[in-house]
Image: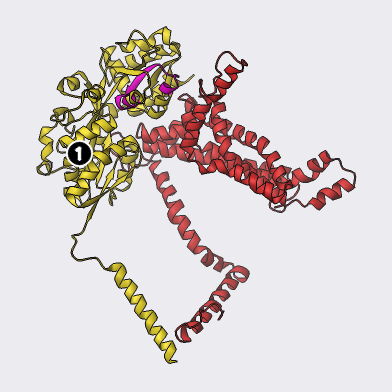
Amino acid sequence: MVRRRLQAVSVLLVTIGLVVLSTWHPAASAPRRTLVVAAFGGTWEEAMNRAVVKSFQRKHNADVVVTLPGNSATILAKLRAERNNPTMDLALIGGGLETVAAREGLFQKLNFNNIPNIKNIYDAAKSPVAGYGPSVAFSGVKLAYNTRRVSPAPTSWEVLWDPKYKGKVGFPNPDNNGGLMLIFLFAKLNGGSVENADPAFRKIATLKVNNPIFWTSSPAAQDMFVQEALWVSAMFDGRVAALIQDGSPVAMVCPTEGCFVTHTYANVVTGSKNKDLAEAFINEYLSVEAQAIFAQAAGYGPVNKLTRLPRKIAELVIYGEDDIKKLISLPWDQINQFRDAWVDRWNREILSR
Amino acid sequence: MSNVIPRGWPTGRPDRLLRLAARALRRLANAVLFRSRASTLIQLSPGLLILVALFALPLLFLAWVSLWRHSPNSFGPTPLTLENYRRFLFDGFFLRSILRTLQLGIVTTLVTLALGYPLALIMARSTARVRGFLLVLVLTPLMVSVVVRVFGWMVILGDTGLINKALLALGLIDQPLRIMNTMAAVVIGLAQVEFAFMVLPIFSALLGVGRSLEEAAATLGASPWRVFRHVVLPLSLPGVAAGSALVFSLSVSAFVQPQLLGGSSFFVMTTLMYQQITATLNWPFGAAIGFIILGTALLTLILLGVAMRKISPRRAGHAT
């Protein structure tokens, strides 16, 4: 009986010991905070880790958890789903969805005193809705072409209609933001507007005789360039930069009719308990050093005016005031009103066989 | 029971309590399983609760969203409307996408059935070692992410891909075959992975067919073909039905393969739904398309069930 009681006591003591051990924190260290950042996978995440996350964690005694819901649309979906109880503190979002999210109250206005680097960014990188998060990277949509197959080097979007390249020309669908941009451009060039896109659809329909490849997924289009299923197409510049760096015979040009600049904005999620930390993260992202590392690693243009890039990188990304001025910025607010109509019309008039 | 309690457990009391609890549980289980029908619900309630919370509630929410009116400038409940369903169901373009979806489901089912039945038969008739090996082979494609697998197919099926290069090198063709961006590419991409879902149910149904039945038929003078046609095949039909139902539902709800292998003009319901969610941000319409997919698939499965009951000589479930 005595032995049994001893055993019982020892079991109890061990249990208490374990409980205490598992809940005890060394009192000396200040609590480490955690910042949850929604971003994009692949090259973007790797570059962001190298350029921003590492130095931020060191400086602010915080852990950064990067979550990857997918693209801007899936990040918006997650923001909407978590509206009342967000798990993310900071979200990267672009392609016109930043205004949708800001309008729906999914983002909160920033205290720019916590983001001193904002005074060094280009005007083009400021939020389209006043008070919200800035763009952290420029990306462009330009005309990409295979240098061995397409000569002379094209200077106009009209090259897509050139019968010499029949079957090898590509065109992004409006499911991809590149497609929306081109509809906008061809509407403008042919006397139309966002409200009246008829001229664009008429013009693009004439491309069908050249047997184009209409694509949606940028990685798939990139792959088609490697396999030479595509010789010439509008492409995001980061994708082209990756192709060039991998040694593919590809180059890009901003055609005389114009090409585009788009942004990825960093915003603090409404209801985040780490607003100050998120603002510090944005500040770190905008810093000269982070912008330079990010541009080199990811192929996106720096938004900080003071960033200096080596010549090899500077040629591949959107860089400098002159470069930015040449590019068309899109009236996303207006275009968002017509996404549904354009996609529907595109399905019927351009894609249906 | 007392063997379960480790020796040296403090005092005899927990031991006794445990025994009491076990007895009570056993009585409850007996009552539920064998006697009372009302208490079946009690038994099922934990599972039901999980189903309701994780399955029914999100589905109900989506059904509600599908009745909202879309606006590009706001997202939230509006006065309810059937407009989204009307838009899809009264439009030739969208109706053609339903037909193409069904076509994709049926073709993929037939292809996996034609390839899967012989394999299931071989597996059911081989030794345990061969069977295990074949089983691993059938399941391997499931272990690779669907996107990675599809990108692999893009490399193989492309104009300058493995197949076309090989055929060109052999001089069998002088123009690359167009495989990518056709229904064939999508069916190949789907069939590869859904093969397992066809083979396994048929295999398990065939295992249930005793060799003695075949021997009896053969003794009575039936040729191998007649043994198969009149004994084995009818008894394996429940497996065929289960496999077909699985492959069909997976095919009509597949998204990655049609999107990446079918090309931009290959409109099936899932790709149209995805477009509404990610490109136009018209979630209500996307949700409505989701329910139309669900309805289409359920309707087809019910028809399949009715047809199977007509063909099958015995009630389904008996042979397995």
Q: Nearer the viewer, residue A283 or B19?
A: A283
Q: Nearer the viewer, residue A44 or B169?
A: B169
Please report the residue visible at 58 percent of the width from the left and 21 percent of the height from the top: B166
Q: Is residue B268 above or below residue B246?
A: above
Q: Which residue is mark 1?
A: A285
The colour scheme used here is by chain
Is residue A237 within the magenta segment? yes
Q: Colour of chain A?
A: yellow
- Is residue B57 in view? yes
The picture places residue B255, in percent across and down from the top left corner, at 48, 35
Q: Colour of chain B?
A: red
Is residue B20 within the magenta segment? no
Point out the stretch of residues depicted in magenta. A224-242
In the image: residue A92, left or right of residue B113? left
Q: Nearer the viewer, residue B89 or A77?
A: A77
Amino acid found under the numbered disc labelled 1? Tyr
Q: Nearer the viewer, residue A89 or B152?
A: B152
The picture places residue B41, in percent across and down from the top left corner, at 53, 64
Quarter of the image for residue A293 reads top left
